[in-house]
């Protein structure tokens, strides 16, 4: 979100840190009170499973995720199994769409859990395949950077769910085309635009206006949009191009100017670090975007993380107790 104070974006904490509360200065508003079933999640490293056959060969972590919400890991060994299964599926071009969606969600749940458990780090590092060490390190470091922008005490977390609407994002190919166009026109790397889009609104999943008045998939304040926007602030294409235009003007393409431009997008060094780490993962592993595309919206409350599925709508904040009582 384009702002002048160090206030965390609500979506980045939901998607990446799983920790959002009202009153941070960057919540979205607008929605009504229904929900949809939990999205599926799963992945596979088996060639048979990835090609859509031999589902019995799916790793158990993926099989469970494909049937529904991924389980939270209860040990370092379990989180390693989840990460390996998810990352292998995301990296394999043979992975079918349903398995890829499940892999992305499983990946997200695993990194959320590992990010909250630094005591597992040494055991996880020792058990990971060498080719995944850096990608895991950077994803976890990104999550912890974003989480550091938010209250650490459960007593400071909200007992209400936000007045948001959660929608299906634009197709991945549509987003990639917009990122690529912005890179061609303004010199801002596509992966940085993707990371910002993920951080700000979960690639457009969160609909609403922040208390600061920011709107659209890239969260522009109207005054900033008046300078850098062209067209519709709620358009994926137009807002991504506006972000490219803004970052170029802030010196993103100048030698040593990248971090400062990101800081001007959100005045937080933790934000700059988190976005940069995600962008670097996508630079090294372009298919990482395909996993991030399937990350869902989690909202950390005083009663723990709550998944806000596609179809969630609330015109006003909903007490967590009431929401939980209505869920199966």
Image (cartoon, rainbow, N blue to C red):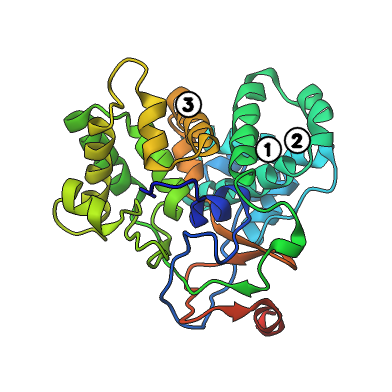
> Within 10 angstroms of label 3, few (less than 14), some, or many (20 or more) residues?
some
Residue ID at (29%, 35%)? 247
Q: Say whether residue 58 is visible.
A: no
> Within 10 angstroms of label 2, few (less than 14), some, or many (20 or more) residues?
many
Residue furthest toward the left?
231
The tag on residue 280 is: 3
Q: Which residue is mark 2?
A: 80
When the figure is inspected, residue 304 is found, relative to residue 322, above or below; the finding is above
Q: Say whether residue 38 is visible.
A: yes
The tag on residue 95 is: none
Give the percent coordinates (x, y) of residue 296: 54, 56
Q: Is residue 186 left or right of residue 142?
A: left
Residue furthest toward the top?
255
Q: Which residue is mark 1?
A: 83
Q: Is residue 205 left or right of residue 159?
A: left
- Quadrant in the rendering for residue 128: top right
Q: State if disc 2 and disc 1 touch (CB < 8 Å).
A: yes
Residue ID at (41%, 51%)? 203
Spatial separation of the CA atoms under disc 3 and disc 2: 22 Å
When the figure is inspected, residue 127 is found, relative to residue 78, above or below; the finding is above
When the figure is inspected, residue 171 is found, relative to residue 85, above or below; the finding is below
């Amino acid at each position: 979100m384009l702002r002048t104070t160090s206030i965390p974006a609500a979506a980045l904490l939901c998607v990446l840190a799983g920790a959002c509360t009202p009153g941070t200065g960057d919540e979205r508003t607008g929605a009504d009170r229904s929900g949809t079933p939990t999205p599926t999640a799963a992945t596979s490293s088996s060639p048979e499973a990835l090609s859509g056959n031999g589902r019995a060969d799916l790793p158990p972590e993926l099989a469970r995720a494909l049937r529904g919400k991924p389980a939270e890991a209860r040990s370092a060994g379990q989180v390693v199994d989840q990460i390996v299964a998810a990352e292998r599926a995301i990296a394999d071009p043979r992975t079918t769409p349903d398995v890829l969606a499940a892999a992305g969600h499983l990946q997200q749940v695993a990194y959320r859990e590992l990010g909250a458990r630094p005591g597992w780090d040494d055991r996880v590092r020792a058990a990971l395949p060498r080719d995944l060490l850096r990608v895991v390190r950077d994803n976890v470091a990104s999550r912890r950077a974003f989480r550091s922008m938010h209250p650490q005490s459960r007593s400071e977390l909200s007992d209400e769910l936000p007045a948001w609407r959660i929608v299906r994002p634009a197709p991945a190919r549509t987003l990639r085309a917009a990122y690529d166009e912005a890179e061609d026109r303004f010199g801002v790397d596509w992966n940085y635009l993707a990371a910002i889009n993920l951080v700000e609104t979960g690639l457009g999943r969160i609909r609403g206006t922040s208390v600061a008045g920011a709107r659209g998939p890239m969260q522009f304040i109207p005054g900033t949009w008046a300078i850098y926007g062209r067209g519709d602030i709620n358009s994926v294409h137009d807002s991504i191009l506006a972000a490219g235009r803004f970052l170029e003007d802030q010196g993103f393409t100048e030698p040593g100017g990248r971090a400062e431009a990101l800081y001007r997008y959100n005045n937080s060094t933790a934000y700059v670090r988190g976005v940069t780490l995600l962008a670097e993962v996508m630079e090294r592993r372009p298919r990482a975007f395909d996993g991030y595309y399937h990350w869902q919206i989690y909202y950390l409350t005083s009663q723990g993380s709550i998944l806000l599925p596609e179809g969630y709508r609330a015109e006003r904040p909903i007490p967590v107790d009431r929401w939980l009582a209505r869920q199966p």
